Amino acid sequence: MCKNLLEAGISKHVVPVCAAISTDPGYVWFYDSLSVGGGNVSSDKGDMVVYAHSVDSYVQATGIKPDLIQVGRGGLDLMALKGATETIRRFKPRIIASVLPCHTEVLAFLKDLVADYTFYFADHTFVWKEIEYVGFLYTAAR
């Protein structure tokens, strides 16, 4: 990841953190999906235990003011966003979430959280390492 950030010319704007994201900070089971270059927090026993930040705890600890939050693990987006409630309310960052059109939980959560967000949905269907990504929900504060 660091090599990609450097080659893309954005290494001064992105800080990689070796941790998971969850609703609450603390140690969590993590399932390492080596075949797709990522993994996810697991409620069941996973492959390893890792430390997880919530977005809110990380923002509070570091003092950063995010202007973009991107979550891309279908089905886990809502969990990550619930851990960013105060950050989203306070800073109103743009949000990109990979979602299926039939999954409206993320949209409903964000609509309730920030009344002045404008929402966009784009169909960018593609398959990467056997995972099909169907669409993305974009937000922007008015």
Image (cartoon, helix red, strand yellow):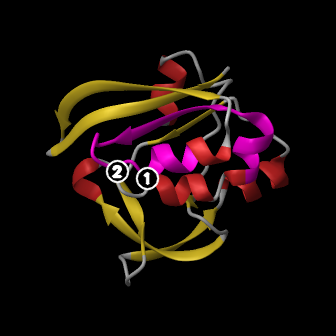
Q: Is residue 126 left or right of residue 52?
A: left
Residue displayed at 73% across by 54% down: 56
Tell me the quarter of the image containing the C terminus: top right
- In the rendered view, tell whether residue 118 sits above or below residue 100: above
Query: Is residue 18 in view?
Result: no
Q: Is residue 92 left or right of residue 95?
A: right
Q: Is residue 124 left or right of residue 72?
A: left
Q: Choose the circle earlier in sequence order: 2 or 1.
A: 2
Amino acid type, label 2: Gly
Tell me, for residue 105, which label it has, or none. 1
Residue at mark 2: 74
Query: Is residue 80 in view?
Result: yes
Q: Is residue 47 left or right of residue 113?
A: left
Percent x, y for residue 35? 22, 53
Nearest to the observer: residue 83 or residue 37: 83
Asked if the magenta segment contains residue 57, the reply would be no
Nearest to the observer: residue 3 or residue 119: 119
Residue 22 in which image quadrant: bottom right
Residue displayed at 59% across by 20% down: 10
- In the rendered view, tell whether residue 30 sits above or below residue 89: below
Asked if the magenta segment contains residue 99, the reply would be yes
Span highlighted in magenta in the image: 86-110
Nearest to the observer: residue 118 or residue 22: 118
Q: Secondary structure at mark 2?
A: loop
- In the rendered view, tell whether residue 24 sits above or below residue 140: below
